[in-house]
Image: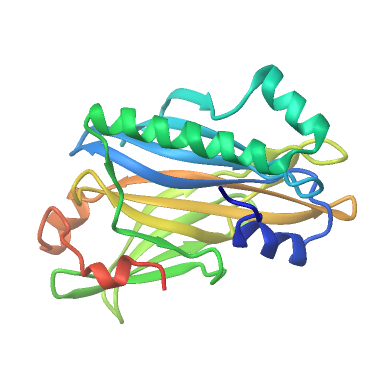
């Protein structure tokens, strides 16, 4: 049983004051190739009492449409534990529900995503990896009206814009706040090397507090491979996709 909040939550508690609203998303498992599904864990952060609410989300890939959303602990039991301040049992029951959900997902053909890099502690807007014999850089370029994701052959090769990201409304103490992506939170390969999954996010002040969000972006790699003569599907160096 876990008896302390996760390190990420501790870091946020130290670095931020009383967040008004915040959620993060982490990829867990996937199935399929060019078309398939991805399991994502969404965590709504409770910065004051520690009762983070975790929800398992099923997304179609690469369409990025949400098919299912299941809270790990909800209803009367969750309310009772929160009222009693029993954080340890609350988290233990969530952990047990997640373990059961992942076992059932395995039986449906899902496999854990192992080529994945957590970039939250780095606070970076770029990620460099090797594709075939070519070094590539994934770049997030923030903007007031929209953010953009680019892929560039390093150091001075061609560059492709992969997608544009419009700002997202995030609940704040004074009402919804429009936030545009300003950092990469996580990158992963799904679809057996055919889809690049990117989690982007942002934090911003609102009414003397902080609000934040994270969003999943799914990017097919076939067109880039064809244009640049790169092997497809992508078979990367595992060491580059492992969190230090």
Quarter occupied by residue 87? top right
Residue sitting at the far front: 1
Vertical placement of residue 243 versus 192, above or below: below
Residue situated furthest top in the rendering: 76
**Residue 31's quadrant in the figure?**
top left
Q: Give the side of residue 20 with respect to residue 218, left or right.
A: right
- The vertical placement of 234 against 122, above or below, is above
- Most extreme residue toward the bottom is 155
> In the rendered view, how is the structure colored?
rainbow
Looking at the picture, how far across and down is residue 170, in whole percent?
Answer: 70, 40
Q: Position of residue 113 (x, y in %)?
A: 31, 49
Q: Can I make out residue 136 in this image?
A: no
Decide: is 240 above or below 173: below
The residue under the point 88% across, 39% down is 174
Q: State the residue in front, 16 or 211.
A: 16
Q: Which of 203 and 95 is in front in this view?
A: 95
Image height of 80 relative to 172, above or below: above
Q: Residue at x 51, y 24 (%)?
A: 70
Please tell me which residue is depicted at 59% across the width and 42% down the height of the picture: 43
Question: Which picture quadrant has residue 205?
Answer: bottom right
- Percent across and percent down for residue 79 are 75, 25
> Toward the viewer: 222 or 55?
55
Q: Is residue 148 visible?
A: yes
Residue 110 at what x, y percent from top left? 26, 35
Q: In which quarter of the image is the C terminus?
A: bottom left
Q: Is residue 120 left or right of residue 45?
A: left
Residue nearer the viewer, 236 or 223: 236
């Amino acid at each position: 049983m876990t008896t302390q909040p996760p390190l990420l939550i501790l870091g946020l508690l130290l670095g931020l004051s009383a967040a008004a609203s915040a959620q993060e998303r982490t990829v867990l498992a996937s199935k399929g190739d060019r078309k398939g599904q991805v399991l994502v864990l969404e965590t709504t952060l409770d910065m004051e009492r520690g009762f983070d609410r975790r929800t398992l989300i099923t997304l179609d890939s690469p369409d990025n449409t949400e098919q299912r959303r299941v809270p790990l602990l909800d209803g009367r039991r969750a309310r009772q534990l929160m009222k009693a301040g029993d954080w340890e049992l609350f988290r233990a029951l969530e952990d047990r529900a997640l373990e059961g959900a992942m076992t059932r997902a395995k039986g449906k053909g899902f496999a854990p995503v192992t080529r994945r890099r957590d970039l939250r502690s780095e606070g970076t807007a770029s990620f460099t990896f090797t594709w075939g014999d070519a070094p590539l850089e994934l770049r997030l370029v923030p903007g007031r009206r929209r953010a953009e994701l680019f892929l560039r052959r390093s150091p001075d090769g061609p560059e492709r814009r992969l997608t544009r990201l419009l700002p997202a409304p995030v609940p704040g103490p004074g009402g919804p706040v429009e936030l545009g992506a300003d950092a990469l939170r996580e990158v992963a390969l799904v679809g057996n090397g055919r889809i690049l999954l990117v989690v982007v996010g942002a934090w911003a002040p609102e009414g003397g507090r902080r609000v934040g969000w994270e969003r999943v972006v799914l990017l097919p790699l076939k067109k880039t491979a064809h244009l640049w003569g790169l092997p497809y599907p992508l078979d990367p160096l595992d060491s580059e996709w492992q969190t230090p």
